[in-house]
Amino acid sequence: NPTITTNITDNDTSAIILSGPSTVAEGATTSNYTVSLTNGIGLGAGQRVTFTLDSASGTATEGSDFSALTAAGLSGATGIALTTSTGANGVITVTATNTTGADLASGAPLLSFAIATTQDTVVEGTENFTVTLGSSTATVVTPTITTSITDNDISAIILSGPSTVAEGATT
């Protein structure tokens, strides 16, 4: 009997989503931001997806109100190997490879990270910064998370002067 070989062309495009905290207290580190698979699309064993991550100033200033996102701060999920490079303006390119030997389902995390904020003594109100996820090869469902830094500084007013004043006198 003759053998016929049929090739199946995969037409699925990876889909990824960014999730993360909407608020953080001044001087604290955020809870984790996570990049995960989404839209019902998983990642086959040995397959990879490439994307970019970046943090940026909003009303909060990167480098003084919060720390910039760095490649060293990224933690791959279990069974995910990360390859990173940092380009212009601190944009991090990440390739996440499934090393588990099994297919990962939609919803599986690829990596996580946190961002530290800076404690200061300036009353400045709530400020914010953004974290952005991008990709030229995967569908990005939630490309930007805005996180607000809740200021914990309180204005203080001190009133000073003499404890007594004679009637008709000035102080």
Image: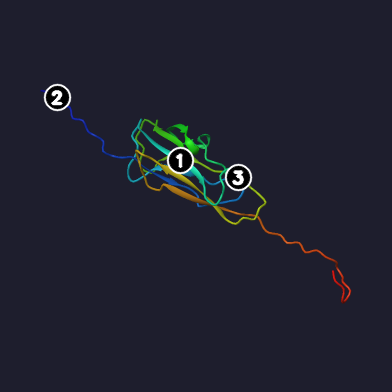
Q: Closer to the camera, 84 or 21?
A: 84
Q: Is residue 25 above or below residue 104?
A: below
Give the residue type that dot 1 points to.
Answer: Leu
Of the numbered discs 1 and 3, the one sitting upstream in the chain is: 1
Give the residue type that dot 2 points to.
Answer: Thr
Residue 3: assigned label? 2
Q: Closer to the camera, 64 or 36?
A: 64
Give residue 81's position: percent from left, percent from top: 43, 31
Q: Mark 1 points at which residue?
A: 53
Residue 77 showing in the rendered view: no
Which residue is pictured at 34% across the width and 46% down the height?
39
Give residue 69's position: percent from left, percent from top: 52, 40
The image's colouring method is rainbow
Which residue is pictured at 64% across the width and 48% down the height?
119
Q: How far apart are marks 2 and 3 (CA)?
A: 67 Å
Of the numbered discs 2 and 3, the one sitting upstream in the chain is: 2
Q: How far apart are marks 1 and 3 (CA)?
A: 20 Å
Question: On the rendered image, what quadrant is the C terminus found in?
Answer: bottom right
